[in-house]
Image (cartoon, helix red, strand yellow):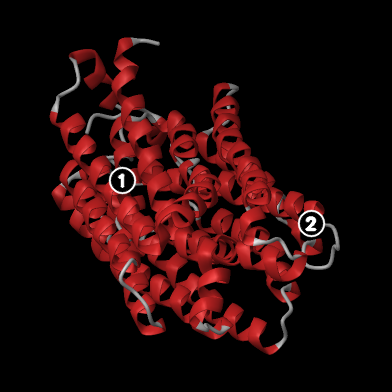
Amino acid sequence: MNIGNRFKWVVCGLLFLAITVLYIDRQALSILAPHLGKELGWTETDYGNMVAAYQFAYAAGVFGAGWLIDRLGTRWGFALVMALMSAAAAAHGWAATVAAFIAARFALGLAQAGCFPCAIKATAEWFPQEERALATGLFNTGSMVGPILAPLAILALYARGGWWTTCMVLCAVGLVWAVVWVKTLATPPTASDTSARLPTSGPTNSKTLEIPIWRNRAAWAFFFGKLLSDPVWWFFLFWLPKFLYDKHHVELTKLGAPLVAIYSITILGSVGAGWLTQRLTARGFTVRRARKTVMFLCALLPVPVLIAASTPHVWTAVIVIGLATAGHAGWMANLFSVVADHFPRRAVASVTGMGTLAGAVGGIFVARFAGWLLDATGSYTPLFILSAGTYIVAWLLVNALLPRQKPTDRQTLER
């Protein structure tokens, strides 16, 4: 590897670790929900309200977080986000009532709102356009590795020290990452490393800079792409352990193998979609056409999840859910990269925040709807039907809204 490429991959590695920590923190409650729910007497609606509180805070915080990070920069902005996230994780350790858990989830959602705007902004700063889907796919594998490690780590910590100890360890891990991030980015890269930052994160000579974000078609493509697809991911993330327990009677101590399998398949989707996008551009596809093609393939992968709620075989359900989450991961690797393709570096976190706000709002609806539906009917079927077709609708909207790239938009421009 050329020395000029080394530092950006160090940054990518730290982004991967941050997203991994984020998802372990986020998953801790859902993994232990069957046990804590029985112990504390939660209903499905209670749990749905906890999930909705997280989503509401995420939605409330994400747009403001993007604006703040565009001004603080990724070094101090991301460190602040991780410190607040660690404090919120610790707060879960003292929660004993439904109201206390709702408050802790709200705090965690508010803190975690800045993670993806920071990560996408850092990717835009350090990677050229044709590598961004791959870099995003790589660091976003943390959103699969986190859920893989979460049942192993959370169950082990809970068995050894209980809920309070589990939360304190999660707090400490986040704080350590924040220190490492600040120290790493405090050391300027070498001259050859700096050359990796020359490619633009968006056309500086285009109309993108002349009109407000809310009037830009690319921003709305990202907005609707997130609004439709994120709720499906939230559903899998927060209800998957409960689905396996309720439908297939997978006990808490045996959740590890199915969850590891599902998120391992998801990693293949995330990295594979980024790799395929890069290969298509190398073969002469425009970046827009490559993203459009790969995102369409990813939109088809969730369709078989229709059978997840009806099959009596747990591993059949695991495989089709894994395909659906792999499709989501590949979809997001390219959708996030759309922002860096069409906007200058100073606006990337704000636009990412706008779209992530949309996804969080959709997630609030799904959390409330899923809790109500499961209390009323006990059936997961409608939720899996919605999950199967959502990405195709999202692809049609994104494709219709995304501006066509001009030749100058594909060139390397000086920022």
Q: Residue at x 52, y 49 (%)?
A: 332
| Disc 2 to disc 1, C-alpha distance | 33 Å
| Outermost residue to the bottom | 376
Q: Residues within 10 Å of mark 1 (few under 14, many from 20)?
A: some
Q: Is residue 164 left or right of residue 49?
A: left
Number of numbered markers: 2
Q: Is residue 147 left or right of residue 94?
A: right
Q: Which residue is mark 1?
A: 173
* Residue 405 seen in the current view: yes
The kind of residue on which mark 1 rests is Val
Q: Residue at x 81, y 53 (%)?
A: 316
| Outermost residue to the front | 160
Precedes in sequence: disc 2 or disc 1: 1
Residue nearest the observer in this picture, 411 or 87: 87
Q: Position of residue 234 (x, y in %)?
A: 53, 64
Q: Position of residue 311 (x, y in %)?
A: 85, 63
- Tags 2 and 1 in contact by the CB under 8 Å rule? no
Residue nearest the observer in this picture, 22 or 324: 22
Identify the element where label 2 is drawn.
helix
The kind of residue on which mark 2 rests is Val
Q: Is residue 143 left or right of residue 216?
A: right
Q: Which residue is mark 2?
A: 314
Q: Is residue 103 above or below residue 151?
A: below
Quarter of the image with the C terminus is top left
Q: Position of residue 403 (x, y in %)?
A: 47, 50
Quarter of the image with the N terminus is top left
Q: Residues within 10 Å of mark 2 (few under 14, many from 20)?
A: some
Identify the element where label 1 is drawn.
helix
Q: Residue at x 62, y 49 (%)?
A: 256
Q: Position of residue 64 (x, y in %)?
A: 24, 65
